[in-house]
Each structure stands twice: as structure tokens, then as C-alpha cells.
Amino acid sequence: MAKFKKAAKKKTAASPSSADMQAQAEKLSKTLSESAQQIWLAGVGAFGRAQAEGTKLFEGLVKEGLNLEQTARKFAGARTHVVRDVVENRVDQARERATDTWDRLEKVFEDRVQRALTKLGVPGRDDLTDLSKRVETLTAELRRQGGAPARKVPARKAPASKKTAKAAPAKKATKKAAGPRTTPRKKAARKA
């Protein structure tokens, strides 16, 4: 046990005393206090500098923002023209397609109406034109045979409702062509 007492005495002699520990604690406390003070002063200094240079920094950022905005507007303006041209081309193409479609639809409608009228026996424009030419030819022939000089009757385009009116003079003309009739005037002219 004697050895144990000697080892214990050595350990106690080697361990620091409470006074040493207290000095070290005070030293550490003082170092921490000084560090906190320095951090506080650095923060106050940064705040002061931010106030002094903050307006300069703010104005610089505003200038950079204006430059970026102008650049973006120029770019957007150039792109706007390109987009506008593309949209106008597409609108023109759509307009042409619509016009073509409308024209085809109109043609189909006209053809169907013409077929329906033909089925109902209503003469078309070509039929009326042919009929008008035939009437003119017959009138000229009758005048030539009747001895009266043929005078040119202007061709008129007759509407579909006047079909019967055009056909009636043709019937009268064929009756005259069938045989000469003597009218009271002609009889009086023969006697004289």
C-alpha cells in the first residue's frame, strides 16, 4: 500500500491546482470577451460602411438594371418584328385558304342550284341565250321573206320569268311564215 500512497502523492503533485485553473478560466473568459467585442465592432463597422456605401451601391445596381432592361427591350423588339411577320404570314395563309374554300363552296352551291333548276325544267342562261339567237334569226328570216328590210334587233338577256314572252313572238312568226295572210290594209293596197 505504500506504493499506492506514493503514486497518489505524485498524481496530486502533477495535477494543477485550483488557483491555476482559476487563472486559466479567467484568461479564457477574457479572450472570449475580447473576441465578442471585436465581432461586435466589426458588425458596427460593416453597418456604418453599408450606410455610407449603400446609396452608392443602390445607385450602381439601378444603373445596371436600366442597362439590362434596355438590352432586353432591344432584343424583345427585334423578336417582336420576327413574331409579327410570322403571325401575319399565317393569317394571310389562313385568309387565302378561307377564300379558296368559300369560292369552292359557292361553286358547289351554284352547280347544285343549276342542276335543281334543270331538273325542274327551268332553262339556264345558256339556254336563254341560244333561244334569243334563234328568235333573232327567225325574225330576220321573216322580214326578209316578207319584203320588209331586216332591221337589227339588239339581243337582250331575258330573265327566266320572261321565257313565255320570248316564246310567244316565235309562234307568231311561224304562223306568218306558214302562208301569206291578207289584211284589210293589204286588200285596200291591192285594189288601188
Image (cartoon, grey):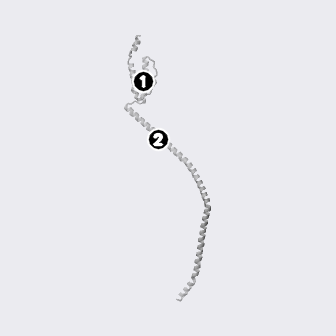
Q: Secondary structure at mark 1?
A: helix
The residue drawn where x is 39% and y is 14% is 184
Q: Secondary structure at mark 2?
A: helix
Camera-nearest residue between 50 and 73 = 50
Q: Residue furthest left?
A: 120
Q: Which residue is mark 2?
A: 98
Q: Residue furthest top?
A: 192
Residue kind at label 1, given as amino acid type: Val
Q: Which residue is mark 1?
A: 135
Q: CA distance from mark 1 to mark 2?
A: 44 Å
Residue kind at label 2, given as amino acid type: Ala
Q: Considering only vertical position in the picture, is 100 above or below 152? A: below
Asked where in the image residue 115 lies, by quadrant, the reply is: top left
Q: Is residue 119 left or right of residue 31?
A: left
Q: Which x, y percent locates residue 171?
A: 38, 22
Q: Which x, y percent locates residue 130?
A: 42, 27
Q: Considering only vertical position in the picture, is 135 above or below 120? A: above
Q: Is residue 22 left or right of residue 122?
A: right
Q: Which x, y percent locates residue 109?
A: 42, 36
